Amino acid sequence: MKSKMIKKILTVNAVFACLFGVSLFFFFDTQLDDLLGKHLRVHPSFTGGEVAEDFVETIDDTDSLDFVRYTVFLPVINAKWVDNSEYWQLVFDYKNGSESLKNLVLYIDFDNIAGGSLSFLPDDAHVSFDENHPWDYAVKVSDNEAKIYDSAKNFICNAQFLSLEKGTQFKIRLPLKDEGLQRILGAKKTWHYVLADGNLQFAGENSKPLGVEMKIQNKNAASEKEDEAFISQMKKMYEEAMESDSGADDIEENLTFYKQKIDENPEDFVSLANYGSNLAKKGGESSVIQAVMLVNESYTYLNKAAQLSRGKDGEVEVLLNRASVSASVPEGVFGKSEVGAKDFVRLASLSDDAEFKSYCWAMASECYKKCGKTTFAAIALQKAKNLLK
Amino acid sequence: MILEAILLGLSTGTYCTMYCAPVLIPFLFGCEKTGHKRNAALTGAFLGGRLAMYFILGAAFAGMELLVHEYMNPVLARKLSVYAYIFCGLSLLFNSLGVKFPWGCKDGCHSPKLRRIGNDWVTAVVTGLSVGLHVCPPLWTAILRSVFGGNGISGFFYFLFFYVGTLPFFIPLLGIPFVAKKLPVIKRVSRVTQFCLSLYFLVCLGLLPFFFG
Amino acid sequence: MVSSLILCALMSCLTFFFCVVMGNFAPTSIIYAVFLIFIFTRMTFAERKRIGSGVIYRRIFQTVFAVGFCIAFISDLYAERGSMAITSEAMNNSELPFCHIAIPQVLLPFLITKSIIFPARISGAYAAAASMICIWLAVTLTVGRGWCSWICFYGGWEEGFSHVAKKRRLNLLPKNKEMREIHFGFFLFIILASICQLSCIYCEWFCPFKLTTEYFPMNSIPTLLAGVMFIGLFLGLVVVLPILTKRRTQCSTLCPFGAFASLTDRISLFRMKIDTDKCKGCLKCASACPFGAIDITTIQEKKGHPELNCAKCGECMNACPEKAISYEFRFNMKKEKCGCGRKEPKTAFGRVLREISEPAQLFRFAAFTFGMIMSSGFVDRSMKIVFDAIKGAF
């Protein structure tokens, strides 16, 4: 009797799993992937090693995301499926792929190599080296290749050089075949001078090199939680501000109202944007099938509105509608997070209100994080915080 | 000092699994006679060979003045590994053909001429010696500390305790006869595995890198 | 009849959503959706007429999926990288597509190193590691090794080639046991070698499907040798031997995922059952099995189920003249000598429910749903490519 009952329950579960469970799984596939993806990572030997240190600097203080980033990795041994089994990776990211990257020179001081040089390779100038940190090895990047020199300016070997992300990222892998370069394996600290077109990057007014502890970078989980709390706070602030301004809550009424206005004037971009936004809201309250159809339809209106409103009054309202929709729809299904982030960045540039700008930068940060652009996310968040200081 | 040495030995877990498990697991599962004593003795022979090679390497490194850095030259380590795979692969291949061929031969013997050199005991010792050629970072550190740490006797014991620290990872192998008894099919399956591994070690990890870098 | 109609209607709705709606109502997505609904409907009603007769539709579906996947995947590679060969950029950026065959190779090293020993995207793309692992888990819990015969986009090649020849030229039935031993022995070798090297050895040296997806550039002797090996394995195990033996030789002797799925199949919902009372020992099922999962001894010793490596394709059901083979729930595998314990439902509704909850119906539905969803994007894109190519030619 008991076993029959158990079999019946199991049969019902099997029926549900087979008829509905499979399709439900694919509906929630993105969320499951993200959940599992948080706990997975690729073996460091494939990605260039563990990160020792990374330095990010925004290029200017305007509402742009121009930045330079320099990441130093720990050396890798026994790497598989790559040209060099032992290498040391250094990565440059420039948002705009500046031309000056073509004349990049790195001067590196190893703490376990005595001596070094205080003079430049030919064609470099503008700064001087710290006497306490004469460089031991230099990597000169030009014409899509990277050459390694020792402190006596002798050519050692070519480094593997890759220009990625449409020229905005340079990956340099120094092969560790040379016994001198192999000293990196025992180095506890290294100092880096990063020169682009003869100018020292990351150092500000002085010419101090970047110090890098050669151990795995400790990512602070607490600071990530702080960031999330900041973004939630900004969202709450905005919602409170919008509550007092909000109009009708009824979506169908809004749709009818805006449809009428669009019929009267097909180029009324504010109505187009509001119609699109309400369609997306309607999708949020519908079944999954309808939701996908409605959100896709809403973008035809939102995109048209954004196009028509460019540079005109009302652009803020239009972009705000589109950005809000982009930030709320699942990235895995619609892939609109980057569109949303760019809209929020433009909104920040169009407004003078510090709190609103801060909200826009915070939302841009969240959107960039969703689509995997972590550097932009970090910079946007930094800007959001700086505006409220 | 003893605790430090043992802890250093325990830190080799990943490397021990990487280098020793592929050799020992199919080898021990594929044995004709799967008694606990024989299994433990073969494992002991393997470990003895490995220890002997570690001492030889330590003496060679000290003699060739290679112990100047706290890290092992990775290029040299890879070259030693190539030799390790060649000898290990050859030994496992002789064992496969001479004693443990998966099909069709009486007592697993495909090539009677290889019965002596492919004998289980010889294979255990030779593969132990070969696996000893894989130099992992903790092993390098242990060699450095035992050579430069103090006088000869304390250095010797430091290394011995380091080696004792690596032994817990081999304890699960003592359960092989138990599993083999429950799953008799695993003997033939392991023999296929050993044959494939021997060819893979010899050709893909040994001869190809040896000739083509 | 009603139960079949309900299932077909449900499948049509799912196909409409996953193919047509997600494909933005493109004409090719509509064509493929119609094809899928046709296949499923024909399969369901054919099974009503004669048990096992629906297998031809499974074969057609899987072959179409394999070809469509190949076309779409290769074109994606050309769009992204400009070649089928793996570029340094893709390798350095960890952008290699992660396929299911890598899963058994990365599991144990993951426990040791807490990382995936394959340079793939972790999430956010269709061939990301997290995505494939989630799909594998869902498939394992439902259809188990039915993946190989219903969903695998590589196995479709062998499915197609193994039905090219009318007559079998080479009989491998007496060697089933040895082939299984080779399969599991090779699987164990792959696992141990992957632990040894902390990289996916099968992908590096042995995968024959590199010919239909991507491969390492052959710019050195070792990579050239690897190239010769995978091309040889493809021609031998995927083309020639299936034609000669009418079996899926790669799937049943080499594929590590197949061996792994055989082991994890124990947690799936379904299993094939052989009713030893009805079985007359004709061995037609053993002859028909493309995976060599029914030995002569399986029937002679009245084991009551195929061997471990059964992929639940249903070919044995089609071949059996006594209808002694059926799908069954794994939790219900105990032998029932007669239907005495089972009460017949009194109402039509009850009868319909009983029919819907038949293990065979549920298995086919679940397996087809997986296959339909996973194939929709690829086959749709491949059709677009083919139509554009034909347009371009004219």
Image: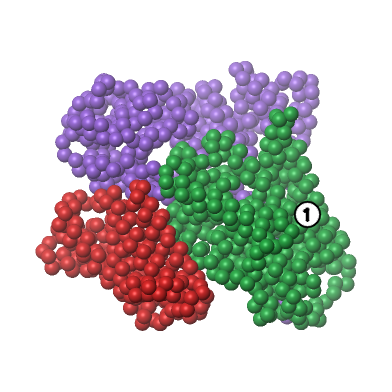
- How many numbered marks are there? 1
Residue in the foreground of this view, choosing between B137 and B188? B188
Question: From the image, which quarter does the C terminus of chain C lie in?
Answer: top right
* Residue plotted at (80% across, 59% down): C44
- The shade of chain C is green
Please provide percent x and percent y for residue A86: 33, 46
Residue A117 against residue C61 in the figure, above or below: above
Q: Can residue C101 be seen at all in this image of the molecule?
A: yes
* Chain shown in purple: A
Residue at the far top in the pictured view: A312
Please provide percent x and percent y for residue C34: 79, 46
| Label 1 residue SS | helix
Left or right: B120 in relation to C57: left
**Corner quadrant of residue A11:** bottom right
Please provide percent x and percent y for residue B122: 32, 73
**What kind of residue is marked 1?**
Phe
Which residue position is annotated with label 1?
C40
- The shade of chain B is red
* Residue plotted at (27% across, 21% down): A123
Please provide percent x and percent y for residue C251: 60, 60
**Corner quadrant of residue B16:** bottom left
Residue at the far left in the pictured view: B151
Residue in the foreground of this view, choosing between A65 and C84? C84
Chain letter behind tag 1: C
